[in-house]
Image: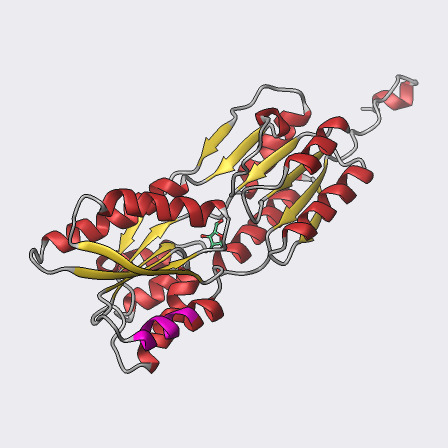
């Protein structure tokens, strides 16, 4: 058999690979590392040329990266916005250049929703509610006692910090015995989580019963601070966190963390598929929500072998 080219027939030039500019928040957590790995692996697997930029948790770096993607005329821009607001100008520039923008993981607050085509990621308010529901159930087993809660928030102004706070507060409002006495940002990192928890513990004005951390990394940092203060994390202080990374499962197995609410970082394959559809001009859903579970310490040993991040 000869190829059609041998007979002089026109052969279509191979399609140029899709080029995606991706601006990542940073490398602040175990979750983020898994998210980056998933995006890079999916791009490779899918034959997508990925231009990847790490913003080191700074919005100005993300704006620069997006402008550079526009200048390079990429086919599609995807990014996980470090904070919610302040995106209108640069997204208008992308729209004027006719480059579609996909949000992954975190949302933006823009005046014109046509500035992005789709948003794929978790429902952070619901994650906060799940954390709150776990505490409500736990508190119901010990009625009568007031529970003093301290909160480690994520990055100030970021969608997960705002939404996880909102969802948790909404649920615990159902029990007047549950009160947040202190709430401060630990910027989603272990180092800051530890530092802020140390300050909470030093205040010594009220016994701390519960720590609600907006991610596992801050909870793991706080666990160290609690141990250094001579207390038993997971026993003297109940600890609730979000993400479901392996480090959290190990902490649960060691009896130091009570529950983690899942936030799935493995968005790469869905993102590549979505990007292809968008670039092909297909109509796509404006919001794609990832499905997630809740893992209390009692199921940690069974679940750990199944964890992929
Ligand atoms: O936006 C998702 C959050 O960002 C994850 O919960 C956290 O670990 C990460 O830094």
**Where is residue 303 drawn, in percent x and y?**
31, 55
Principal secondary structure, stretch drawn in magenta: helix
Q: Residue at x 70, y 38 (%)?
A: 90
**Where is residue 189 drawn, in percent x and y?**
49, 64
- Compared to residue 55, the image places residue 278 above or below, namely above
Name the colouring of the figure: secondary structure
163 and 123: which one is in front?
Answer: 163
Q: Reply yes or no: does residue 248 show up in magenta.
A: no
Left-right relation of 189 to 50: left
12 and 255: which one is in front?
Answer: 255
Q: Looking at the image, which residue sits at the far left?
A: 144
**Where is residue 164 drawn, in percent x and y?**
38, 47
Q: Is residue 247 visible?
A: no
Q: Residue at x 89, y 17 (%)?
A: 9
Q: Is residue 234 visible?
A: yes
- Could you tell me which quadrant the N terminus lies in? top right
* Residue stretch rendered in magenta on the structure: 196-203
48 and 241: which one is in front?
Answer: 241
- Compared to residue 166, the image places residue 300 above or below, namely below
């Amino acid at each position: 058999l000869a190829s059609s080219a041998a007979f002089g027939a026109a052969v279509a030039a191979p399609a140029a690979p899709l080029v995606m500019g991706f601006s990542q928040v940073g490398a602040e957590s175990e979750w983020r590392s898994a998210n980056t790995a998933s995006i890079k692996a999916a791009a490779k697997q899918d034959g997508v040329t990925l231009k990847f930029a790490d913003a080191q948790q700074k919005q100005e770096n993300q704006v620069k990266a997006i402008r550079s993607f526009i200048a390079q005329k990429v086919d599609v821009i995807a990014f996980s916005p470090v904070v919610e607001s302040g995106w209108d100008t640069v997204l208008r520039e992308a729209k004027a250049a006719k480059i579609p923008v996909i949000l992954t993981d975190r949302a933006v607050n823009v005046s014109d929703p046509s500035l992005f085509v789709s948003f794929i990621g978790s429902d952070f308010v619901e994650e906060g509610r799940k954390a709150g529901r776990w505490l409500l159930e736990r508190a119901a087993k010990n009625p009568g006692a007031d529970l003093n809660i301290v909160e480690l928030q994520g990055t100030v102004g970021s969608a997960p910090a705002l939404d996880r706070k909102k969802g948790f507060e909404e649920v615990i409002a159902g029990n007047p015995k549950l009160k947040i006495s202190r709430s401060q940002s630990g910027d989603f990192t272990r180092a800051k989580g530890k530092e802020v928890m140390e300050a909470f513990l030093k205040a010594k004005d009220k016994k701390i019963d519960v720590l609600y951390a907006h991610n596992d990394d801050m909870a793991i940092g706080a666990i160290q601070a609690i141990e250094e203060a001579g207390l038993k994390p997971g026993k003297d202080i109940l600890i609730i966190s979000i993400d479901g990374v392996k480090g959290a499962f190990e902490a649960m197995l060691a009896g130091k963390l009570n529950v983690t609410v899942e936030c799935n970082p493995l968005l790469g394959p869905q993102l590549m598929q979505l990007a292809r559809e968008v670039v092909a001009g297909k109509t796509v859903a404006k919001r794609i929500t990832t499905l997630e579970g809740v893992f209390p310490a009692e199921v940690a040993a069974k679940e750990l072998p199944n964890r992929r991040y």
